[in-house]
């Protein structure tokens, strides 16, 4: 039993209970550490988050949460802190989630439509249809396989940088960084979120060049299908 749990009022624990197993395509519920709740944007390039920092009991006996989130609203993408009644937690979280959706659904010159399109196709091909894909991680054997695959892919990417243009080297280095980010998330993120990360990795690799995607995907697609999709 976590000692911190029994230091909190049951009222506070119940207010946060719905977030314990909460999952979605746009966010990750992470270890709160010194906070009471920590949710971050699933986009690893984003610094958007939703946190509950602490609680306080008012003189009238009601409880409040100190909410810390980013972005604030449609007009201000900056950090926003405010005390909210604990009964309004779900409403405030939905406001934040709607902001993430707005960012994702609004087209801009900063998006890379080719990578997005490629990633969507890979995700459709390898989408995990398990009922618990949003809640469960891959099993240990699958995690070890993916770790080995990502380490091997990173080594191949390093070798592929030879005799490349400066622009292509930058793209390959982004892919190298993504292998580390995916590897670090293997034991903490759900199957679906890992497949979203892998799909984006493959989508970027395909745009970078046929030689790249052949090395990090085509050459191992049969093994990936067997280990990840079929679980054998």
Image (tube, rainbow, N blue to C red):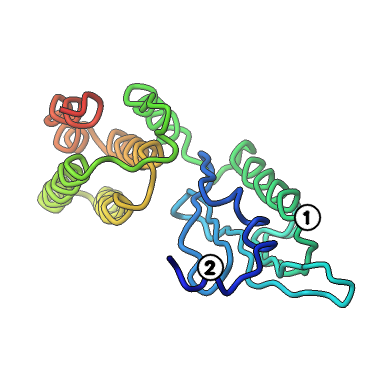
- Drawn side of residue 97 relative to residue 122, left or right: right
188 relative to 113, above or below: below
Q: Quadrant of residue 177?
A: bottom left
Front-most of 152 and 66?
66
Query: Is residue 126 toward the left or the right of residue 193 in the image?
Result: left
Nearer the camera: disc 1 or disc 2: 2
Up-down relation of residue 68 to residue 154 (above or below): below
Position of the C terminus, as image quadrant, is top left
Residue 162 seen in render: no
Residue denoted by label 2: 5
Describe the element under mark 1 as helix, strand or loop: helix
In the image, farthest residue toward the right: 60
Closer to us: 229 or 151: 229
Query: Is residue 68 depicted above or below 206 in this figure?
Result: below
Q: Report whether 130 appears left or right of 28.
A: left
- Residue behind mark 1: 87
Task: Please name whichever residue, 156 or 57, is drawn nearer the observer in this view of the structure.
Answer: 57
Residue 45: % across, % down = 46, 55
| Circle 2 crowding by C-alpha within 10 Å: few under 14, some 14–19, many from 20 | few
**Disc 2 on helix, strand or loop?**
helix
Query: In the image, what residue occupies the spot 53% across and 68% down?
Result: 5
Location of residue 220 in the rendering, given as x and y in whole percent from the top left corner: 13, 31
Q: Quadrant of the N terminus?
A: bottom left
Residue 11's quadrant in the figure?
Answer: bottom right
Gap in Å between the C-alphas at discs 1 and 2?
Answer: 20 Å
Residue 7, position in %: x, y? 57, 74
Q: N-terminal of the two: label 1 or label 2?
A: 2
Q: Residues within 10 Å of mark 1 (few under 14, many from 20)?
A: few
Residue at 61% x, 48% y is 18
Q: Is residue 88 left or right of residue 217?
A: right
User: Are the residues at dot 1 and dot 2 in contact (C-beta closer than 8 Å)?
Assistant: no
């Amino acid at each position: 039993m976590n000692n911190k749990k029994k230091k909190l009022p049951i009222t506070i624990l119940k207010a946060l209970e719905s977030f314990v197993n909460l999952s979605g395509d746009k966010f990750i519920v992470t270890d709160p550490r010194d906070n009471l709740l920590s949710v971050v944007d699933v986009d690893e390039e984003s610094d958007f988050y939703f946190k509950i920092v602490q609680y306080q009991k008012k003189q009238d006996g009601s409880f409040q949460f100190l909410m810390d989130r980013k972005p604030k609203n449609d007009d201000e993408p900056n950090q926003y802190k405010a005390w909210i009644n604990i009964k309004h937690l779900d409403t405030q979280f939905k406001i934040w989630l709607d902001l993430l959706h707005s960012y994702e659904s609004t087209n801009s010159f900063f998006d890379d439509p080719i990578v997005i399109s490629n990633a969507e196709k890979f995700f459709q091909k390898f989408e995990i249809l398990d009922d618990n894909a949003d809640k469960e991680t891959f099993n240990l054997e699958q995690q070890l396989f993916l770790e080995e695959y990502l380490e091997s892919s990173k080594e191949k990417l390093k070798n592929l940088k030879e005799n490349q243009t400066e622009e292509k080297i930058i793209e390959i280095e982004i892919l190298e960084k993504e292998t580390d980010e995916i590897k670090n998330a293997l034991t903490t993120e759900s199957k679906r979120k890992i497949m979203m990360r892998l799909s984006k990795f493959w989508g970027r690799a395909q745009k970078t060049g046929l030689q790249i995607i052949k090395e990090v995907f085509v050459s191992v697609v049969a093994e990936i299908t067997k280990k990840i999709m079929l679980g054998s």
